[in-house]
Amino acid sequence: MERELGKPAIAGGIPARDTKIYYGHQYIDEDDVQAVVQVLRYQDLTCGPKIGELERRLCEITGAKYAVACSSDTAALHIACLAAGVAEGDEVITTPITFAASANCALYCGARPVFADIDPETYNIDPEKVAQAVGPKTKAVMAVDYTGQSAKLDELLEICRKNGLTLIEDGAHVIGTRYRGRPNGSIADMTTFSFHPVKTVTGGEGGAVTTNDESLYRKLLLYRSHGITRAEELMENVPDGPWYYEQVALGYNYRLTDIQAALIISQLNKLPMFSRRRKEIVAKYDEAFARLPQLSVQKEIPESDTTRHLYILRLVPEKLTIGRRQFFDALAAENVCCNVHYIPVYYLPYYQKLGYRRGLCPNAEKLYEEIITLPLYYSMTDRDVDSVIEAVTKIAVYYARQ
């Protein structure tokens, strides 16, 4: 049966296009393949020269003095908390609009996450709410650069300096972004990165921590690799020989392989073109959706020159006759595959069992009810972008409240 002209496809209907557009996708070219193949043909598959090369490259890109590559952003967050001295009985302030790892890293250390509400326009953690959440047990602030837009780092650093806290920037989304002209990764006390496949730069998996503090850097190295060292200045005993090592802290096996490092290095070489294309797509989306009163576009602060990892479309419920789920399903019927980022962390059953309750962060909770993550990745064609815009516009107009 033919679809009514102008009416969005519904489940079982005829989609506007034959192929699906996914919300995220990695881009791998022949340079990436050959970078990995080269590593497979030499001796060191892990703990080899590519790890140091990757760390140096990250320092060049971010402007940080030190970088520590590790197995994932979750691992990076964990060792950053450990390096900051987060321990049993402490509190770490973070945002609820993030992946659970941003809060879980506090739990790993025996600390308690404290959730501060977001700015309703930028969707990033609100520094005023952070300041209000600081208490005698607060040890660190975990600021997330949601969607790739930088958090207000200057304001957060001021709060941290005033209260003797460590600012950890969860930069899983932020590689390629600059804050007040400086690359993110060189501003907070520590910044973590993710190289998951849907991120701007990928290694399949992988993460890193950057810092300008040599003391933190030495701790990060220890916690990444079992707390074991061969550095004589850290040992309690005189080495018996070149094989000698000591465990001086309780660390973890959070090492990255040279295979992954080689892929990440090759991907980092393409970061400028990845960034340009993402900005082009975001600009087209913003221009199209700003015209529709049924939709709201994420506000960007002027301090952030953003390489966007996610594009968040916010619905205006009072101007639509359908809810978020129906809008989501209508897009899927048009072969535009979306997602939702994120469920507030304290909604998750594990956190509910810890005693967290809804109502903690009203701005974050309202945002969650109204958002959809649209497709955004380097290899989207202009036709893909136009198809997403057409599908969103068609649905918004058809279901507009009169």
Image (tube, helix red, strand yellow):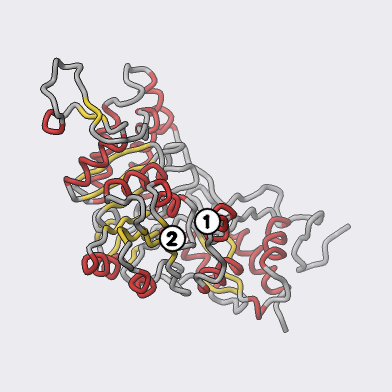
Q: Residue at x 73, y 56 (%)?
A: 333
Judge left or right: residue 285 versus residue 228. right
* 12 to the left or right of 197: right
Please name the amino acid that badge 1 sits on.
Leu
Picture coordinates of residue 148, whole percent (x, y): 41, 58
Tag 1 secondary structure: loop
Element at badge 2?
A: helix
Identified by mark 2, the residue type is Tyr
User: Residue visible at 11% across and 32% down?
Assistant: 233
**Residues at marks 2 and 1, CA–CA distance in whole angstroms:** 25 Å
Q: Nearer the viewer, residue 397 or 325?
A: 325
**Quarter of the picture holding the C terminus:** bottom right
Q: Is 64 positioned to the left or the right of 177 in the image?
A: left
Identify the disc placed on residue 146: 2
Residues 257 and 126: in front is: 126
Can residue 27 be seen here? The reply is yes
The nearer-to-camera label among 2 and 1 is: 1
230 versus 69 height, above or below: above
Q: Earlier in the sequence, mark 2 or mark 1?
A: 2
The residue positioned 39% from the left and 20% from the top of the image is 40
Residue located beneath label 1 in the image: 354
Question: In this rendering, is residue 119 above or below 243?
Answer: below
- Quarter containing the N terminus: bottom right
The answer to which quarter of the image holds residue 389 is: bottom right
Neighbour class for label 2 at 10 Å: few (<14), some, many (≥20)? Answer: many
Q: Nearer the viewer, residue 281 or 98?
A: 98
Q: Position of residue 102 (x, y in %)?
A: 43, 53
- The answer to the question of whether label 2 and label 1 lie on touching residues, with beta carbons closer than 8 A, is no
- 397 vs 144, left or right, is right
